Amino acid sequence: MTVLHLADEGEAADLAAFLSRLLHYDRGAAVRLQAAGTALAVFGRPPSFEVLAIRAVRLAKPFEDGLDVTLDVTVSAGELLESVDEAAATAAVPAAVTGPPWAGVMPPRGGWRPEPGLPGADALRGMVTAAVAEFRSRTGELAPEGRTRAELDRIGREIWSREVGGTRLPVRAVHAAQSLGFLRPFVRAEDLGLFSSGTWLRLRTPYGSVAVRRAGLPTLGVSVR
């Protein structure tokens, strides 16, 4: 069994927290792991947000498993979480699983260009708060017979698909960043970045990134419950 040696207890705790949040939205969540050198990237896709979440984890030593010096495998998020030993700062890589469709559509590794116009962290958090309040208000006004899944999804899609200023970044990406622990209260404006590469946009914070394709991703319901 391949064992990952994480940089310290904090990295292990942050990895466990990220996996727990993914499992909150999807109990059967899978994650794709890519490791090379002392860097591990963990990719997940919480279905409520239609985004790809990326958590970068520091390793204590360069990844090496026999003759392999890189790791690229899709595994159960729940099994990976169970294997995390925070005190020892280790995690065992579970057996590979058949990856969901999104695991085969990864953002590019390079070619990212800064995009202007991203508001500050406080403004982004305010957008999410306002969007949640609007969703609750509008759905709360629905008559019982009109409170269908289709109508909830329609309202949710209208709200969460709105763009952040002129950046083309949907508000749902910011909501995902906050919900997954990437946009923490003490994150400052200078800690954030917005980048583009091809059809992808990526919101970067010190605690993780959220990537979204401007076209081509299958759609899912985005109601907030």
Image: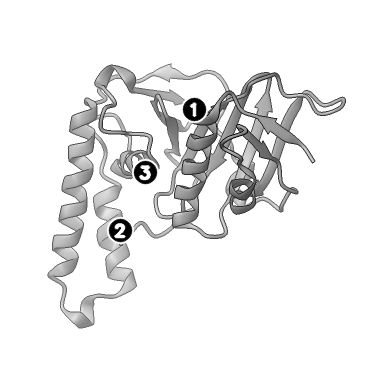
Could you tell me residue 97's position as x and y percent?
71, 52
- Please name the amino acid that badge 3 sits on: Ala
The spot of residue 167 in percent (x, y) is 29, 29
Type of amino acid under label 1: Gly
Tell me how the rendering is colored: one colour
Q: Is residue 101 above or below residue 181?
A: below
Residue type, numbered disc 2? Val
The vertical placement of 209 against 49, above or below, is: above
Secondary structure under tag 3 reads helix
Which numbered disc, 3 or 1, marks the residue closer to the eye?
3
Judging by the rendered image, the residue that carries numbered circle 3 is 176
Q: CA distance from mark 2 to mark 1?
A: 29 Å
Q: Which residue is mark 2?
A: 224
Quickly name the residue at label 1.
Answer: 198
| Element carrying mark 2 | loop
Quadrant position of the C terminus in the picture = bottom left
| Circle 1 Cα neighbour tier, 10 Å, few/some/many (<14 / 14–19 / ≥20) | few
| Of the image marks 2 and 1, the number of the one nearer the N terminus | 1
Q: Where does residue 68 sit, x and y in percent of width and height?
A: 82, 26
Nearest to the observer: residue 177 or residue 65: 65
Please tell me whether residue 170 is drawn above or below residue 28 in the rendered image: above
Q: Earlier in the sequence, mark 3 or mark 1?
A: 3
- Examine the rendered structure and indicate whether residue 151 appears above or below residue 82: below
